[in-house]
């Protein structure tokens, strides 16, 4: 995740709308997932930064694999 970009968020929203509009055979489960993604896009920098902090502040910094040497 990089710094907030209104242009990038608008591009993401347009891509999701395009996906929903141009895939009539998309299963209802997938449609609901993409609609949820669309409604959850951060529309301002404050919301975006809050979400980034919430995601990364709870991450465990231990390595994925611990090697016995």
Image (spheres, rainbow, N blue to C red):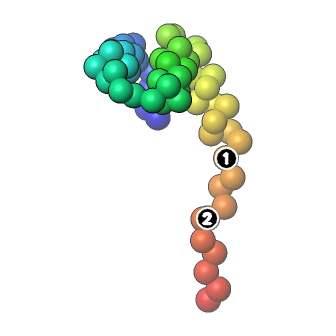
Find numbered disc 1 in the image and state the secondary structure of the residue it sits on: loop
Q: Is residue 65 left or right of residue 13?
A: right
> Residue 48: horizontal and vertical position, in percent?
55, 20
> Residue 37: horizontal and vertical position, in percent?
51, 23
Residue at point 58% right, 30% down? 52
Q: Is residue 32 left or right of residue 53?
A: left
Residue 22 vertical position relative to residue 56 in the rendered view, above or below: above
Q: Nearer the viewer, residue 43 or 69?
A: 43
Q: Outermost residue toward the bottom?
A: 69
Q: Outermost residue toward the top?
A: 44
Residue at point 58% right, 14% down? 46
Find numbered disc 2 in the image and state the secondary structure of the residue it sits on: loop
Q: Is residue 11 visible?
A: no
- Cα separation, mark 1 vs mark 2, equals 11 Å
Q: Which residue is mark 1?
A: 59
**Crowding at label 1, few (<14), some or many (≥20) Cα neighbours within 10 Å?**
few
Q: Nearer the viewer, residue 38 or 43?
A: 38
Residue 38 vertical position relative to residue 60 in the rendered view, above or below: above
Marker disc for residue 63: 2
Question: Mark 1–mark 2 contact, CB under 8 Å?
Answer: no
Based on the displayed image, in which of its 4 quarters is residue 20 positioned?
top left
Q: Is residue 38 left or right of residue 54?
A: left
Is the C terminus in the top left, top right, bottom left or bottom right quadrant?
bottom right
> Residue 67: horizontal and vertical position, in percent?
61, 80
**Crowding at label 2, few (<14), some or many (≥20) Cα neighbours within 10 Å?**
few
Based on the displayed image, in which of its 4 quarters is residue 55 positioned?
top right
Q: Is residue 2 left or right of residue 53?
A: left
């Amino acid at each position: 995740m990089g710094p907030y970009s209104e242009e990038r968020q608008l591009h993401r929203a347009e891509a999701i709308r395009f996906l929903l509009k141009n895939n009539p055979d998309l299963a209802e489960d997938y449609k609901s997932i993409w609609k949820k993604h669309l409604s959850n896009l951060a529309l301002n920098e404050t919301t975006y930064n809050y979400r980034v902090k919430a995601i990364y502040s709870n991450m465990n910094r231990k390595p994925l694999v611990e090697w016995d040497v």
